[in-house]
Image (cartoon, rainbow, N blue to C red):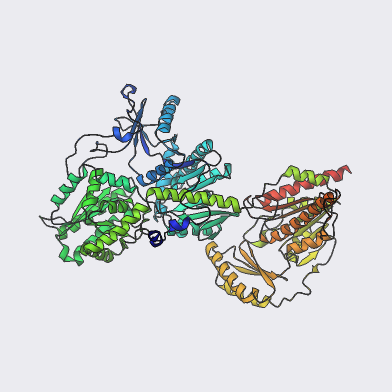
């Protein structure tokens, strides 16, 4: 009991007490992992007779040992195609196919694989290039026969429940074109400098869309109700929205392993809207760090104009959760690798070669985001500022070749810097920097990490740096300090490392001196903190956390959302034809016309006016437009164009029934002295928000920021709302309406619902009510009509019950008393939108289509009479 009481309170323990969370979670179906490429390389035998069945497919490690000896050396000159010393990569054979476990993305695949222990999982991904055995030629998709694909499908399913996707020549434009030439540089803050005519980019974008569509179609073909779809990285950013269109109730998550740039950089992307809309099809969007998540939310606000919070983005009434999930590594697997028999001889060789020297290790891909140039300059600064370390410290820098376009220039620059440093600070007996630009054997890699005295990582932009995590595992006995760039995705999790700014050469040099001078006790304390974090927050922990949050988010959405069915036009038409006295209400902006940037541009279309007139000409109809617009606007646009149309202006403050020549002011007895104070506050924020303006009406004042910067306008609106609530609303009988890109202040208790109530109470024998609107001000109408309809239906049921002698009907006021009255309250927006309406349409165009449909019925009935 004492031990339990003294145990530290962690986030994981707190989670056990939160609703829909805890140590275990239940996935209603399978987990469908979706990655750009499957975790295996595929090889096709040149001669089918040479293929053989793997003797032990269940225990692949037993059949994977390749036994050619590699001489112990600090860094071998092995090329990638040479056979390695003992390897643990899984290899499976069937017919003329061989699949070999790939080397890259170990953290990702280890995390996904861990979920298969407790959940049913399948994995969907591209096969990758399929090579002919013992040659460099790749098999094209078109060259594979149906039998070939069937055999490979079976082998991959038996190997790891993998469903392969066979991509045609579009895979090149998708991956090497759009992903590597457009998305990857931009996400890493590398804005393009080459001027082109745009044709290649357009073709690559088309391939990107086509490949994403092929992935989405494959997922849909294998999806079962209750499955959780787990999508990974920037190669598949359009897939969530493509899935949402076909399976709207699916639980969809996407995790971005790369960095995500600030909105200023992201807005340089020409397809920025399509990319964001694609990602927002998910229920949960995950990132490595909080800053990347914040950048994504900011981009959604600035580019799409979405409302947002710190933890999500509101898209047409649907909340997309955005979270931070730092990925880990498979610590047990790394421990296994570093203790392989081939590692120790190489460790001894390195120690012998650099006897009596402190070893600083750097291992990076050779691209501009990894900060190799900055590292070398900082090391030169270290040798200059701390001469006591000269001839006592060596930097072993391993750079892995890449395919990026700037590779050759960067390689030349790195070589020049190293030659300069070695020339100035080296001698015949000593070389300060040893650079190996090549792939190295895994045993050599873990040997280097194990013998190092300091690990040095100076990435200038990095989504996830596994080298830093593997270094800590390898240093469990030696406790060498880690110097880590603050711009890596792992920096936020490894607080015990020495954090540096790669551009601050003097700061990095100082960190090197501190690391080399650190006491044994401090080394051990820092290492233990880092080691505990990495072993607890493993790749398996990351994968479970993300899927758990996805399941929780989806469950909470299903509990909270008040979804409405899509408008049943046949049912509407049937009720309309059978009714004898109808009352019809329409909002204007966003309902009869689309929302536009400039309010004065929202002029009615001729088709809409013609349909309105046809409805008004039907003697059974009474039609009203209840709008936030002022009297002059409604008179000019509607009153002079449509006869027998009732108008209500400024959210119910003014009325003009059909046939009336003058407006009725509902505000005659209302105190309007509040307007001066509100005007002063609105003017203050208008001066400080470029693109905003104030609209003065007789009954209300509106501050519009639709033409302002989306994010700054939303920020200023929140500040303004807070100012109004403290200075005006708390003292005077007014209320604030938060609309679409506007704030409106109006008298309390004057709203569209009150006008609808007044009109309906004067026509209690109405047997058909239609009301359409799109924003929060229209919810007052929906609420009033829903309550009135409920009372009408309830009293009818009570009367029927009382006739049997079971119940005496209570006395209750009601707005209309027509039994079996039909109510169609329609909101414009997605089905997930929280509303008091009982039907929805997605756009204002659908409202006008329904209006035209009813108008044609009225016209045909009038003609028949």
Answer whether residue 437 is visible to the viewer in this image: no
Relative to 95, is 265 above or below?
A: below
**Looking at the rendering, which quadrant does residue 628 occupy?**
bottom right
Direction right: furthest residue: 865
Measured as percent of width and height from the top left, residue 329 is found at 35, 49
Image quadrant in which the N terminus is located = bottom left
Left or right of residue 490: residue 266: right
Q: Nearer the viewer, residue 420 or 443?
A: 443
**Could you say where residue 37 lies in the image, as x and y percent from the top left?**
41, 40
Residue, x 66% and y 62% (percent of image)?
599
Residue 96 lies, with reference to residue 549, above or below; the image says above
**Viewer-nearest residue: 540 or 19:** 19
Q: Is residue 246 visible?
A: yes
The reply, left or right, for residue 566 in relation to residue 413 is: right
Give percent across and percent down for residue 266: 46, 56
Q: Nearer the viewer, residue 176 or 761?
A: 761
335 on left or right of 117: left
Q: Quadrant of the C terminus?
A: top right
Q: Reply above or below: 171 against 197.
A: above
């Amino acid at each position: 009991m004492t031990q339990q009481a003294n145990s530290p309170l962690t986030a994981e323990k707190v989670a056990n007490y939160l609703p829909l969370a805890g140590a275990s979670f239940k996935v209603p179906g399978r987990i469908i992992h979706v990655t750009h490429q499957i975790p295996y390389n595929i090889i096709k035998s040149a001669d089918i007779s040479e293929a053989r069945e793997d003797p032990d497919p269940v225990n692949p490690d037993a059949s994977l040992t390749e036994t050619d000896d590699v001489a112990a050396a600090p860094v071998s000159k092995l090329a990638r195609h040479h056979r390695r010393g003992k390897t643990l990569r899984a290899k499976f054979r069937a017919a003329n196919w061989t699949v070999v476990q790939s080397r890259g993305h170990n953290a990702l695949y280890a995390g996904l694989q861990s979920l298969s222990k407790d959940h049913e999982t399948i994995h969907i991904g591209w096969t990758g290039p399929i090579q002919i055995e013992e040659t460099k030629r790749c098999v094209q998709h078109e060259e594979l026969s149906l039998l070939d694909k069937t055999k490979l499908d079976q082998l991959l399913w038996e190997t790891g429940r993998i469903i392969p996707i066979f991509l045609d020549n579009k895979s090149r434009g998708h991956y090497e074109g759009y992903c590597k030439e457009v998305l990857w540089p931009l996400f890493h803050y590398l804005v393009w400098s080459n001027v082109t005519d745009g044709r290649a980019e357009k073709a690559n974008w088309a391939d990107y869309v086509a490949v994403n569509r092929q992935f989405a179609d494959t997922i849909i073909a294998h999806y079962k109700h209750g499955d959780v779809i787990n999508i990974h990285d920037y190669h598949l950013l359009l897939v969530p929205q493509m899935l949402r269109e076909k399976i709207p109730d699916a639980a969809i998550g996407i995790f971005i392993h790369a960095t995500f740039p600030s909105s200023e950089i992201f807005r340089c992307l020409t397809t920025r809207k399509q990319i964001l809309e694609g990602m927002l099809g998910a229920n949960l969007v995950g990132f490595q760090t909080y800053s990347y998540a914040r950048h994504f939310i900011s981009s959604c606000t600035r580019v799409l104009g979405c409302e947002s919070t710190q933890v999500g983005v509101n898209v047409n009434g649907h909340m997309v959760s955005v979270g931070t999930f730092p990925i880990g590594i498979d610590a047990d697997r790394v421990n296994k690798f570093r203790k392989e028999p081939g590692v120790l001889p190489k460790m001894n060789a390195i120690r012998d070669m650099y006897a009596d020297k402190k070893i600083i290790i750097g291992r990076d891909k050779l691209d501009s985001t990894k900060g190799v140039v900055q590292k070398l300059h900082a090391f030169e600064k270290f040798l200059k500022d701390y001469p006591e370390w000269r001839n006592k410290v060596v930097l072993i820098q391993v750079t892995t070749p890449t395919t990026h376009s700037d590779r050759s220039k960067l390689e030349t620059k790195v070589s020049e810097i190293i030659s300069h440093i070695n020339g100035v600070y080296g001698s015949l007996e000593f070389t300060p920097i040893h650079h190996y630009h090549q792939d190295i054997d895994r045993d050599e890699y873990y040997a280097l990490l194990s013998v190092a005295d300091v690990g040095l990582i100076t990435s200038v932009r990095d989504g996830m740096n596994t080298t830093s995590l593997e270094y800590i595992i390898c240093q469990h006995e030696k406790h060498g300090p880690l110097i880590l760039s603050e711009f890596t995705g792992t920096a936020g999790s490894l607080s015990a490392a020495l954090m540096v700014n790669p551009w601050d050469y003097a700061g990095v040099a100082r960190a090197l001196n501190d690391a080399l001078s650190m006491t044994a006790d401090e080394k051990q304390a820092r290492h233990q903190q880092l080691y505990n974090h990495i072993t607890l927050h493993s790749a398996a922990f990351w994968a479970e956390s993300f899927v758990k949050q996805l399941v929780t988010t989806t469950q909470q959405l299903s509990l909270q959302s008040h979804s409405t069915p899509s408008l049943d036009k046949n049912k509407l038409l049937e009720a309309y034809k059978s009714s004898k006295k109808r009352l019809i209400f329409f909002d204007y902006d966003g309902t009869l016309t689309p929302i536009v940037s400039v309010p004065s541009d929202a002029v009615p279309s001729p088709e809409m006016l013609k349909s309105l007139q046809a409805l008004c000409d039907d003697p059974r109809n009474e039609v009203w437009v209840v709008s936030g617009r002022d009297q002059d606007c409604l008179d000019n646009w509607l009153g002079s164009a449509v006869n027998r149309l009732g108008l209500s202006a400024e959210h119910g403050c003014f009325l003009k029934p059909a046939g009336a020549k003058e407006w009725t002011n509902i505000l005659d007895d209302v105190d309007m002295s509040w307007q001066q104070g509100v005007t002063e506050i609105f003017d203050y924020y208008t001066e400080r928000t470029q693109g905003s303006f104030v609209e003065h009406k007789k009954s209300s004042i509106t501050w519009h920021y639709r033409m302002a910067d989306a994010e700054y306008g939303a920020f200023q609106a929140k500040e303004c709302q807070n100012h109004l609530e403290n200075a005006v609303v708390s003292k005077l009988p007014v209320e604030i309406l938060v609309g679409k890109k506007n704030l409106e202040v109006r008298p309390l208790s004057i709203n569209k619902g009150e006008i609808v109530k007044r009109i309906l109470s004067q026509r209690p024998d109405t047997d058909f009510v239609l009301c359409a609107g799109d924003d929060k001000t229209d919810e007052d109408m929906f609420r009033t009509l829903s309550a009135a309809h409920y009372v009408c239906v309830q009293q009818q049921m009570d009367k029927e019950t009382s006739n049997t002698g079971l119940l005496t009907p209570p006395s209750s006021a009601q707005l209309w008393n027509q039994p079996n009255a039909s109510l169609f309250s329609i909101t414009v927006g997605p089905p997930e939108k929280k509303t008091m309406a009982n039907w929805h349409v997605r756009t204002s165009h659908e409202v006008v289509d329904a209006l035209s449909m009813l108008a044609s019925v009225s016209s045909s009935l009038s003609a028949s009479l």
